[in-house]
Amino acid sequence: MTIPAVSSRDLPHPARAEIRLEGVLHALSDPLRLQIVRELAAVDDELSCSHFDLPVTKSTTTHHFRVLRESGVIQQIYRGTAKMNGLRRDDLDGLFPGLLDALLDAAARQAVRLGDR
Amino acid sequence: MTIPAVSSRDLPHPARAEIRLEGVLHALSDPLRLQIVRELAAVDDELSCSHFDLPVTKSTTTHHFRVLRESGVIQQIYRGTAKMNGLRRDDLDGLFPGLLDALLDAAARQAVRLGDR
DNA sequence: CCCGTACTACGATGCTTATCGTACGAGTCG
DNA sequence: CGACTCGTACGATAAGCATCGTAGTACGGG
């Protein structure tokens, strides 16, 4: 076999059927969390928590990632000491076709409209 | 002439350019407000506040409509004693093309997926 | 085995929000 | 005018949430 893959500690994720639209919208209504999701969508890969350079402490960062995970927007998995984050694109697209893309497009347009950056 | 149109008292609305995606998402992350928006979209017309039969008091209803108005999702206008509510579809579509439809479709799918009603 | 890195858990704090009740204002109709 | 309807304003309350700091756990490498 290739690899024991995942570490022992694992994190609670909602099943696809448990994901609620209201929860997703609430999760994305925070600027920091929306930014995180935009970056994850841009790279289309998993990123460690520490990759993100957010203007808050680590405690707060942990909190935001948890909100995203518990709402079903991202999946998290430990790899060594790092905790990798990935968009649950398949689940979101399955539940709400076109929504994620519309949201990402909307966020991109607003970024351009305001000072971008 | 047809009608003096609007009553004297008018309500503060954000201009199109002031509408923020985060605010829209936050407004729609409440089940009651999402339901209101779904009904407004379904009839594609203005509806009075009292048309909605929400499981909360009138005070709370007023509060929710204000959140929707201040976030730019709906427009409100007094007509006699009634206060009419309409979706700001043009503004939302102009700012975030496809977003509103994706959100409404997502809400409809979820309604079907859960017990509907 | 010890240390450094990555992240968490917990408690505190202050802000926002959802909710209500009561009292009030604006308009319509008799 | 007077009564009724629709909706508001204001204050209270309780819950939720974003934020921090500190202390701690898990993992990997020397």
Image: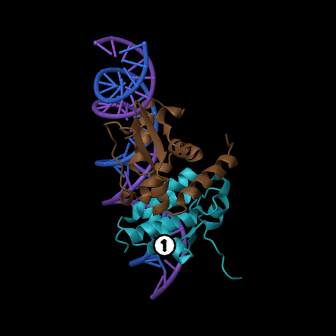
Chain colours: A brown, B cyan, C purple, D blue
Q: Position of residue D30 (x, y in %)?
A: 42, 13
Query: Which quadrant, please, contains the C terminus of chain B?
Result: bottom left
- Residue situated furthest right in the rendering: B1
Residue B103 in view (yes/no): yes
The picture quadrant where one finds residue A40 is top right
Q: Position of residue D29 (x, y in %)?
A: 43, 19
Numbered disc total: 1
Residue at the outermost front position: A1
Write down the quadrant of residue B35 in the picture.
bottom left
Instruction: Give the quarter of the image for residue B63.
Output: bottom left
- Mark 1: which amino acid? Glu
Task: Give left or right: position of A99 versus B3.
Answer: left
Residue at screen point 53% across, 77% down: B43
Who's the residue at 65% across and 58% down the image?
A: B95
Q: Nearer the viewer, residue B14 or D26?
A: D26
- Residue B71 visible from this viewpoint: no
Q: Residue at x 47, y 70 (%)?
A: B49
Residue C10's place in the image compared with C28, above or below, is above
Q: Position of residue B88 (x, y in %)?
A: 60, 65
SS for dot 1? helix
Q: Note whether B19 is above or below B76 in the view shown.
A: above
Residue closest to the eye, B37 or A14? A14
Q: Quadrant of the N terminus of chain B?
A: bottom right
Q: Say which residue appears at 52% left-offset and 72% top-offset.
A: B40
- Residue D11 on image: x %, y %: 38, 48
To which residue does mark 1 refer?
Answer: B39
Of residues B88 and A86, which is closer to you in this image? Answer: A86
- Tell me if B55 is positioned left or right of B86 in this view: left
